[in-house]
Image (cartoon, rainbow, N blue to C red):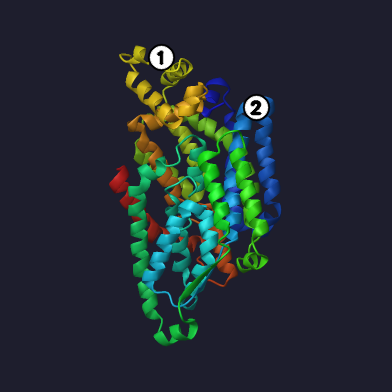
Amino acid sequence: MTLLALSQAQAPNPWMVLPFVALLAIIALAPLLFADWWTRFYPAVALSLGAVVIAYYAVGLQAFDQLAHTGHEYVSFICLIGSLYIVSGGIHIQVRGETTPGFNTAFLFAGALLANILGTTGASMLLIRPWIRMNKYRLTGHHIVFFIFIVSNVGGCLTPIGDPPLFLGYLKGIPFWWVAEHCWPIWAVGLGILLAMFLVVDTLNFRKAPRAVRAEHVDEPDWFRFEGLGNLFFLAMILGAILFAERPAFLREGIMLAAAAGSYFTTRRDIHQANHFNFHPVQEVAILFVGIFATMMPALDWLSQKAGALGHPSPAFFYWGCGILSSVLDNAPTYLGFLSAIFGAYVDADTVQQVQHLVQTGGADLSTFVHGEHSEQIRNTFAALQKFHGDAVARRQVDVEAIEMAFLLGNAAFNHFIVAISVGAVFFGANTYIGNGPNFMVKAIADHQGAKTPSFLGYIFRYSLPIMLPMLVVVWLIFFR
């Protein structure tokens, strides 16, 4: 059952949004206010709040299809995140030598590209340790923060693998290469601005270090050594599963788990030790997102129902709205919330019903809609279905959610709304440590290795406001104003 269909059938009680609000508030504040308590009890908090909502949907609404659909999305999400984390943990990059600002900038650019293949989590876990070693003699906060900005967030804006919000969009029916096709100019501008800023800042930092100090702390000659490259095979398995293994149900997730297991058991122990690999980060993400996926159901349904009251907001509203909330909440559920709002505000129910009829008749009645009120929308939606779900159309087995998404993708006037929330969620997720999963993971690794990372507020006021905000404003002026 889709969000739109649920809103037309049984609407959840608005009070059921409170567990979602409570969980996100606790995730944001507990690590800062009572970290020890949160470390011990976060599983109980997340699972208890999630159980309340699941019980309500099962007993109160009897929305078993909704629960099954959400459960499948969670399994797909965590299998992708976990398998990429495990495979990247089996690849070790050893670095020696002096790094110049130019080389650092190129490294970050390469990390941004890699984030679209390994995901921001995988790329961050793979590259943060060599990044710290490369800059050990002059490591400052800007090295860690720009790494989070570029590799852990903005860089991963081109594929569903890149960042969790985009993968959730992929699970909702956005084609794999659609984001790259429509977002690459924005990605290029945003990334280019950040790399240019980093080059200036890092050059000033580089010039402050006397050559004698650099010579004392640098191992010569420069070189990189890669270990565990056999894991590239398992990475290819994951990518193949995402692209080609949609049916039968859970085949894609099974291949991902097989790749993760193969990587873990074939990787030498010394490589895992060199990477300080353990399962705690992915375990924490898995537990927290059980609660997030469960508790966000009423919030998404409520957004879908109330979106019509927004009228017809501009793409700028979705860019800034989704972005600002992604800065202070986790960007994945925020993206889903605004995607649900777009569905509610713009998807035309009559068009969806007409396209359903076309699917059932194999398109034989298409000519009857040529002169109708919504003829162009109907034809565009049906054409998008044939383009992106040709096999399902041929089998006459297309669900309503796929038609709703085809409505947005097939009618160009609505494309920009999806682009707005995609860029907003990914880019703004860099603004705080809590905006995106890898951010805190990178900070934890850097702290463990003795790097000086800014505090929560220092991160915002010393880096996000003077560096990220100008870039975000430029992107808005060029693409969303």
The local secondary structure at tag 2 comes to helix
Residue that appears at 29% across and 43% down: 481
Distance between mark 1 and mark 2 Cα atoms: 34 Å
Residue that appears at 40% across and 38% down: 418
User: Which one is nearer the viewer's eye here, 118 or 245?
Assistant: 245
Q: Position of residue 389 (x, y in %)?
A: 46, 30
Marks 1/2 in contact by CB < 8 Å: the verdict is no
Q: Characterize the local packing of mark 1: few (<14), some (14-19) or many (20 or more) Cα atoms within 10 angstroms.
A: few
Q: Nearest to the eye among marks 1 and 2: give it.
A: 1
**Residue 448 visible in image:** yes
Residue that appears at 54% across and 30% down: 301
Q: Position of 60 compared to 229: left or right?
A: right
- Residue under label 1, please give it: 364
Q: Position of residue 274 (x, y in %)?
A: 61, 69
Q: Position of residue 405 (x, y in %)?
A: 45, 30
Quadrant containing the N terminus is top right
- Residue under label 2, please give it: 64
Q: Which residue extends farthest bottom?
A: 212
User: Which one is nearer the viewer's eye here, 301 or 441?
Assistant: 441
Q: What is the number of the mark on residue 351?
A: none
Kind of residue indicated by mark 2: Phe
User: Which one is nearer the viewer's eye here, 173 or 244?
Assistant: 244
Whichever of callouts 1 and 2 sits on the residue coming sooner in the sequence is 2
Label count reads 2
Q: Position of 204 compared to 88: left or right?
A: left
Kind of residue indicated by mark 1: Ala
User: Which one is nearer the viewer's eye here, 131 or 302?
Assistant: 131
**Residue 321 visible in image:** no
Q: Position of 79 compared to 180: left or right?
A: right
Q: Characterize the local packing of mark 2: few (<14), some (14-19) or many (20 or more) Cα atoms within 10 angstroms.
A: some
Q: Position of residue 410 (x, y in %)?
A: 37, 30
Residue that appears at 46% across and 80% down: 221
